[in-house]
Amino acid sequence: MLVVKKFGGTSVGNAERIFNVAKRCIADYNAGNDVVVVLSAMGKYTDVLIDMAQEINPHPSKREMDMLLTTGEQQSVALMAMAMNALGVPAVSLNAFQVQMHTTSAYGNARLHKIDKDRIQAELDQHKIVIVTGFQGIDKYDNYTTLGRGGSDTTAVAIAASLHADLCEIYTDVDGVYTADPRKVETARKLDEVTYDEMLELATLGAGVLHNRSVELAKKYGVTMVVRSSLNNHEGTIVKEGNKMEKMIVSGVAADTDAARVAVVGLKDEPGIAFKLFNNLAKKGINIDMILQSIGHNGKKDISFTCTNEDADEAKAILTDAMDFESIDVRKDVAKVSIVGAGMQSSAGVAAKMFEALYDANINIHMISTSEIRITVLINEKNTERAMNAIHDAFDLGNAD
Ligand code: ASP
Ligand code: MG
């Protein structure tokens, strides 16, 4: 069997932990498997590097930033190879150049194009454990790039896809994917499995366990992922295609407090207004999430939307410049709370049940949006945890059946 094992920063945060990870990988190797290991930078080292850059230059070039950040992962892979060698096992570390991990040139947020699997395969053929730097790539000009924060997950899945690995294990400091953040919902329960689509929604909603592009990639190439803890031997959560054993309608509740609502009141009620409004924002790279348009009255209409807190003031400035309306209002003390579940597309009354739970908890809903497998509400931020708990209880997510 060929396994790709990815370990995050906390899992390789110091020498003792590096040895623990090494032993875990060696156990797989000794069982006769081919093992590829993908690592993040040690602990919070990527943040340390960012701070170092800030001290030197508050507006560093993105190219130099990536040149700097890639050193974090290079440290951990070399140290890991040394640890495995010290334990008597042949191992080799490889960086993005050596692996030929090709990406776009979008420094800081590059996308993977293709991986040359020959080098990794050649090392595996010599019975070595191969340890690869996560997060980094190279562009067509031979510059280093990075895949965005948390991008090592995506490296691991990409390598698993290109080598046709049997499994891609993502080791982290929690036991798997939960029905809700256990720090906020006491009755939260670890899920045995989630579908790619559910995981994609959860990752995008800020559940924080996986880089969302890693899930996209896993779905595209049919890579089976497992999210599990590096600190114990618990089973973890399997992320794979459809047909779950657990027949849950809703799999989880997620919250994102980094949301702001921008309400544009008294726009002209005529064709092209929504286009103009969102086009102006898109041109400046402002991402919009929920959208609400009122019905027209007296030739006027209102449009509200949500974006990140960081983008909200800029959105207001852009629209004030570019559009005609009566007033604009920005609220940052709001949060998005969502339920996600592949089962809800074939089940009536899910939305009603969620809204009832919020009503019972006396929580007002400002906006609603849905996808096939997700319902999101915008509420006051101070109610976030109460809302999560109320919904979690209403759907009885703390119980396995
Ligand atoms: N070290 C990088 C980060 O902190 C990549 C990763 O951890 O996946 O974002
Ligand atoms: Mg991560």
Image (spheres, rainbow, N blue to C red):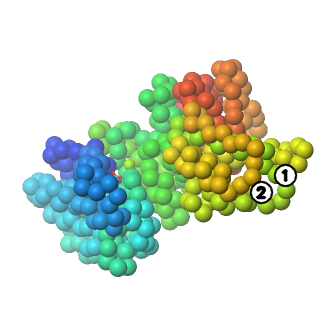
Q: Bin the neighbour count of mark 1 within 10 Å (Cα to Cα): few under 14, some 14-19, many 20 and up.
A: some
- Say which residue appears at 19% left-offset and 58% top-offset: 75
Q: Position of residue 40 (x, y in %)?
A: 30, 54
- Say which residue appears at 28% left-offset and 39% top-offset: 231
Q: Residue 295 occupies which quadrant of the picture? A: top right
Mark-to-mark CA distance, 2 and 1: 7 Å
Residue, disc 1: 269
Instruction: Tell me the kind of residue under disc 2.
Output: Ile
Instruction: Tell me the kind of residue under disc 1.
Output: Asp
Q: Are marks 2 and 1 in contact (CB under 8 Å)?
A: yes
Residue, disc 2: 273
Q: Position of residue 107 (x, y in %)?
A: 39, 66
Quadrant that contains the C terminus: top right
Q: Position of residue 4 (x, y in %)?
A: 34, 59
- Say which residue appears at 57% left-offset and 46% top-offset: 312
Instruction: Decide which of 208, 348 is in the foreground and name it.
Output: 208
